Amino acid sequence: MPGYDDDLRLAHVLADAVERTSLDLFGSWEDEVEVGPDGSLRTPAAARLEELLRHQLQRTRPRDRVEGRMLEATGHGARRWVIDPIDGAANYVRGVPVWATLISLVVEDQPVLGLVAAPMLSRRWWAGVGSGAWTGRTLARARRIAVSDTRLLGHASLSADDVAGWVHGPHGPGFAALTDRVWRTRAFGDFWSHALVAEGAADVALAAWADPVQLATLAPLLREAGGTVTDPEGAPAALPLGPGSTGHPVVASNGHLHEEVLTTLSVGAEPAQG
């Protein structure tokens, strides 16, 4: 299995390159926010940051393809860098400190590394296939992380984003049943729910709609930490990267609770359309 240590180091360099600018622009541009075709918020700040990331990648990995949220894909290599300059854009423009830059590398349609850089939290989370999952401020100041050992749903901490999306979606009755059964429910949202599962601070994370850019970064982090990531029916979280790609609901857990979470979510679920 090839190692990706050099690519992980580059991912940190990329995060370093945009951190100062992202902090300087934090909380601005509220009057210039647009909604993209995929429903994501698009801001001048995000476009500027993505341009910075692309410039660095074109200089250091000229043969690799680059795919982002704001701009058209460039390059034709088998290795694909997938970037989101601001995950949690609504938080970013409103001055809420929970947002991050997502950087991942996809090889042969499989995500092989992911980095979540959250400057306002002074935290990063990252993982490479075969290298484990880590958190810290930098590569030099890091600790290895793993999911929790919680095995009873009644002892579990659940984090869900877009509560209304779950309540009014096809898994609404199951979501209500699940929140009744767990120890506590919070709504950290965006990348943070999944990062907390990876480091064992939460046990289950539900995303009403995770897109391929998010999955490319978060899936390797969760899996290297020992967790499980699927859709609500138990199928592996897919990464349909490319033109027209869309997302789907995602369930992430410490693995021990996964089957029980899926079973509970299925209570009263509407049949899939198709």
Image (spheres, rainbow, N blue to C red):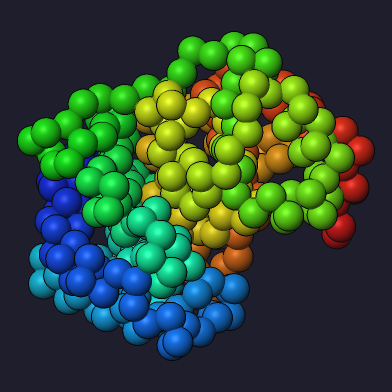
**In the picture shown, does residue 18 fall above or below 199?**
below
**In the picture shown, does residue 26 fall above or below 207?**
below
Q: How many marks?
A: 0
Which image quarter is the N terminus in? top left
Residue in the picture at 52% in, 49% down? 189
Residue in the picture at 31% in, 25% down? 145
Question: Which one is nearer the viewer's eye here, 61 or 193?
Answer: 193
Residue in the picture at 19% in, 62% down? 19
Which image quarter is the C terminus in? bottom right
Q: Position of residue 15 (x, y in %)?
A: 20, 58
Residue in the picture at 25% in, 43% down? 123
Q: Position of residue 46 (x, y in %)?
A: 34, 75
**In the picture shown, does residue 169 fall above or below 90?**
above
Is there any visible trace of residue 107 in the rendered image? no
Q: Position of residue 50 (x, y in %)?
A: 29, 74
Question: Which one is nearer the viewer's eye here, 248 or 164?
Answer: 164
Q: Position of residue 94 (x, y in %)?
A: 43, 69
Report whether 8 appears left or right of 194: left
Rendered image quadrant of residue 67: bottom left
Is there any visible trace of residue 131 in the rendered image? yes
Report whether 116 appears left or right of 176: left
Question: Which one is nearer the viewer's eye here, 170 or 78?
Answer: 170
Rendered image quadrant of residue 184: top right
Question: Which one is nearer the viewer's eye here, 122 or 115?
Answer: 122
Q: Residue furthest left?
A: 140
